Structures are given as structure tokens and as C-alpha cells.
Amino acid sequence: MAPTTLDFTVEELAALTTPTRPALTPTDDRRPVELALVSSIAADYPPETFLWIVFHRPDGGATVRYAWTTGGPALGDRIDRLALASALDYADWLDITDRNARHSTRGRIAIQACALRPVLADVTHGHRAPDDRRAALRRFIDCAGEATGQTPRPGLPRWHGVGPALLNRPH
């Protein structure tokens, strides 16, 4: 069997060795990596879960990303409508989500996974934050107002949300 000779032009050889994907370039945009991590994290949780994911940066800052597993967006929006109609506020949101959340970390990533069915039960049954937690939140808001020179609004802020319609709404 005679040896095979391959004859290529320079252009043909370049076309064979050039990757078909664009070259990776350095960037300061963390978004694609964070979104890929959010997707990977969400895959580890059961349906109807709301995820609050905090990416802690080396400079001391943080980025918060929300995610929902299957069935979570619709259930979260339903919960938010009920909570707002029941006049639940931020203290109630803190208390209810804290009662129903699992906390974990992946390196600098903090994950709060909140099962939405128990949140729905709490909202439906009219669970309210205890008075001491409400008072502590009010003191925190007043302290922040003093530190920034702003006058806080009376009362407590509204229910923060567990569904995409409320959480993704511009404030």
C-alpha cells in the first residue's frame, strides 16, 4: 500500500485548524457565569422552590439573583397576590420565608432555598411576624435613615415577594 499524500492550500489548512466557535475573550461581565451557576444550583432543588442566591464578590459587594424551580413562578406569584391582599408587610415576609428556608453555601455563593407550599400555607393562615421582630426591623430602618440622613416612611415596607412578577418589577 502506497503512502497517501495530502495536498492542501494554505487557506484550506487554515479553515481546518480554525475553531468554529468564537475565541474566548477576557471580560468583566460576571452575568453569564452567574446565570450558569444559578441554573446549576436550581437543578439541585425540588419543584416549587424559590431561590435567593447571593454572589459575594472579593471587593465586598454582592449580586443577588432569584430563581425558581418548576412550578415556582406561578405559585410564587399566587402567594404574592394573597400576601398583598392580606396586607402582609416586610416583617411578615422575613419571618415566613425564614421559617421555610434552607440555607447553604457554595464557596462565596450563599443560597436560601424556600419551599413555596409551606409559604403558601403560612400566608393563607394569616401568619404574622412576632412583635419583637417587627420592632427590630423598625429600629433597623430608623438607624439606616439616621445614617443616610433620610426620613424613613412610617410603618413597614410592603411584602417583598416570592414570585417573579413582584420581584422583577422595577422599584
Image (cartoon, rainbow, N blue to C red):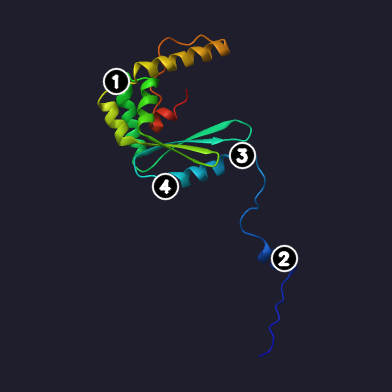
Q: Which residue is mark 4?
A: 44
Q: Amino acid at mark 3?
A: Asp
Disc marking residue 86 = 1
Q: Is residue 71 above or below residue 88?
A: below
Q: Amino acid at mark 2?
A: Glu
The reply, left or right, for residue 168 in relation to residue 99 is right
Q: Which residue is mark 3?
A: 29
Q: Amino acid at mark 1?
A: Ser
For the residue labelled by badge 3, is the local secondary structure a helix, a strand or a loop? loop
Q: Amino acid at mark 4?
A: Asp
Asked whether disc 2 touches disc 3, contact meaning CB atoms under 8 Å apart, the reply is no
Counting every numbered tag in the picture gives: 4
The reply, left or right, for residue 110 in relation to residue 4 is left
Q: Which residue is mark 2?
A: 11
Q: Position of residue 71 (x, y in %)?
A: 33, 41
Of callouts 4 and 1, which one flags the residue occurring earlier in the amino acid sequence?
4
